Image (cartoon, rainbow, N blue to C red):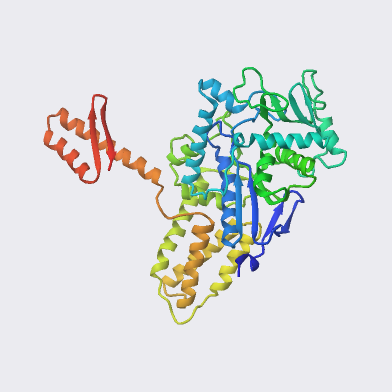
Amino acid sequence: MQLYKNQHIKIYNSLTGKKEAFKTINEGYVGMYVCGPTVYSNVHLGNVRTFMSFDMIFRYLKHLDYKVRYVRNITDAGHLENDADVGEDKITKKARLEEIEPMEIVQRYTVDFHNVLNRFNFLPPSIEPTATGHIIEQIELINTIIENGFGYEVNGSVYFDVHKYNETNNYGILSKRKLEDLIHNTRALDGQSDKKNPQDFALWKKAEPTHIMRWPSPWSDGFPGWHLECTAMSTKYLGNQFDIHGGGMDLKFPHHECEIAQNQAAKGQAPVNYWMHANMLELNGTRMSKSSGNYINPAELLSGKNDIMSKAYNPNVIRFFMMQSAYRSVLDLTDNGLLASEKGFNRLMNAVDDLDNLKSSNTSSFDVKAWKQSCYNAMNDDFNTPILIANLFEAVNHINAIKEGNTTISPEDLELFKNAIHTFVFDLLGLNNAQDTTEETDKLSGAVALLIKLRQEARANKDFALSDKIRDELAEVGITLNDSREGTTFSTN
């Protein structure tokens, strides 16, 4: 029997504002879409937290024997600088500043995105579509919206008519905003905009002569609006209606609100049953901001090369720190918080290491099955990882008590206990007990650089015996020194 039939999840649905029993559209199958990154810069640590939350959810759904199709897109075109549909495409702007092709920017930061997520032990999504790979689908979607009376074309650009849509639907159903309030709080058009109303949003933008990223369409050479791509890709791979749509809290309005409107206008139905939003990551109690200097990126946090934290942190420690907070809670990243998580993580890993050396007895003095179900209960309650971790530290206490002979466990229960701990720690929380390979490479580079310096000093002092000894002994462990006019480098065999 599939595990999901015995473990019943409740999910906080942003659409209704309450926890609801999770019931899939098709039994045993889950369709989940999560808004991915716009690849014009290094991935933000706050984005890492959001994607980590949905990685954990993906892991748990798979563990419960659901067949999960997890789609997470790459936004590689058409994302303007603000939600008023003006300004410059962020990718094109970065390419112009660096005087390179926009797709070079896309490639660079897509690689960075994957590298960062790999260091935090993410599972890859089932499908990772790109906006530029789905231009045809987006054009077809715009045509349908226009045919249904909710889109209009002006001077080669196409806009979604929010006022027309709101006559028969509820624009604001997700964010709980009312169109009347939006109208009241919006400045009047300056006469230069093609929009009928300031609340309307772009489905297609005509490209200016200097705009590099452009595609032919029935209306103009241009590019799709930001909101459109997610509607096109989610429905292509998950159907007109699917189970879960996730993203950061900052995307609820206008991005997700516009997705609902587009789908309703084109397909005549709401696209998603459960909207899930991960909350924000703060740094030392205030919002992260590059302009204010209150900012740290993943590479700086992992390397320790920053002025905010006292040391470098292993990606497992950072992941453990993030899992100690519920995904819907604001999380404050602090040095003290990370230091505490490092101690907790090491304590948990030491206990896991001790599992293989525990001795069993004829009987068990604690209820392993009840403890295991308490872990499931935590995850079933809207993926409550802090309660799960509290239960894991209860297990740590049991492990230590068994070691000291104060608690007993039967052979059958010991096997159940081991399997459950490994499942929750490694498979579901996504932790591992290995050193970060990049961290180890950095340490190796530093050690070899020191030996190269000592060898150079030996050669300068005409101590060729020591110089040769350093070179030969490094070669014996698979490290080859390469001397050139520019200096000495090394390679590993």
The answer to whether residue 122 is visible is yes
Residue 376 lies, with reference to residue 122, above or below; the image says below
**Residue 373, image x, y percentages:** 59, 68
* Front residue (pair 339, 73): 73
- Placement of 435 over or under 148, stated as above or below: below
Identified at 51% across, 52% down, the residue is 320
The residue located at (58%, 23%) in the rendering is 93
Residue at point 46%, 53% (across, down): 343
Residue that protrudes farthest toward the right in the picture:
167
**In the rendered image, is residue 278 in sight?**
no
In the rendering, at what x and y percent does residue 406 appear? 45, 75
Q: Observer-nearest residue: 264 or 310?
A: 264
Q: Quadrant of the N terminus?
A: bottom right
Residue at image point 68% right, 40% down: 232
- Residue 245 vs residue 180, the one in the foreground: 245
Which image quadrant is residue 453 in? top left
- The reply, left or right, for residue 365 in relation to residue 8 is left
Horizontal placement of 460 versus 240: left or right?
Answer: left
Taking depth in this image into account, of 323 and 214 the one nearest to the observer is: 214
Residue 387 location in percent, x, y?
Answer: 60, 59
- Quadrant of the frame with the C terminus: top left
In the picture, measured across the screen, residue 442 lies left or right of residue 329, that is: left
> Could you say where residue 427 lies in the image, as x and y percent from the top left?
51, 58
